[in-house]
Amino acid sequence: MNQSVTGKFISIKRREKNLTQEQLAEKLGVSNKTISKWETGKCMPDYGIVKSLCEELDITVAELMDGEEAEEKSVRAYDDEQIMDLLRRTQELEKQKNILYGILLIVMGIAIQALSHTFGGSDAKDFFSGLLLGVSIGEMLVGIYVLGKNIAGR
C-alpha cells in the first residue's frame, strides 16, 4: 500500500464524480484539509471512514488500498472485511507506538532531571546541571504532548 498512489487514486475518483474536496469532505464529515492530506499522500483515511469513502467514490476497499481499479476477472486474496480489520489493527498499533514514545520521553525526562541534581559545586557544574534540568523539562513536555495527542485520538 503506497500512500501517494492511494491519494492520487482518491483524487482521480473524486474528480470523476465531479466532486470538489469540500463537497466530498462534507459528505464524509471531515474537513477539506483532511481530503487534501489524503490526496497528497500525507496520511491515509482512518479505518472508521474508509467504507464511507469507498461508497462515495464507488470503489471497493481493495481498490482504495491498491490505488487502482480491479480488473474484471481478478481474484482477491482478501475480502473487504479482512482488509478493514487489518487497517484497523495497523492504525491501533501506530497509536499504541506513539503512546509508548510519549511515556518513554516522560521517563527519560525524569531520569535526566534526577541526573541534573547530581551535579553542582562549581560554575561549570551548575551550568551543566541547569542545562540538564532544562532539557529534562522540555523532554517531559514533549512526552506529555505526544501522549495527550494520541490518547485524545488526534
Image (cartoon, rainbow, N blue to C red):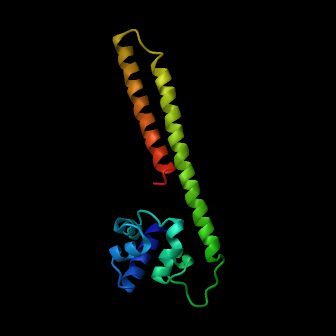
User: At x 50% / y 35%, what residue is drawn?
Assistant: 106
**Can you give x and y, in whole percent of width and height, for residue 74 in the image?**
61, 86
The residue sitting at 39% across, 85% down in the picture is 17
Can residue 85 be seen here? The reply is yes
Q: Position of residue 140 (x, y in %)?
A: 45, 34
Location of residue 132 by image quarter: top left
Give the residue at x 49% y 84%.
58
* Closest to the observer, 99 or 27: 27
Q: Is residue 127 above or below residue 53?
A: above
Question: Seen from this angle, which residue lies furthest right?
Answer: 77
> Which residue is pictured at 38% across the width and 73% down the height?
26
Of the pair 79 and 34, the residue shown nearer to us: 34
Q: Name the quadrant containing residue 139.
A: top left
> Is residue 67 visible from the viewing direction of this image?
no
Quadrant in which residue 82 is drawn = bottom right
Q: Please tell me whether residue 4 is drawn above or below residue 63 in the rendered image.
A: above
The x and y percentages for residue 60 are 54, 80
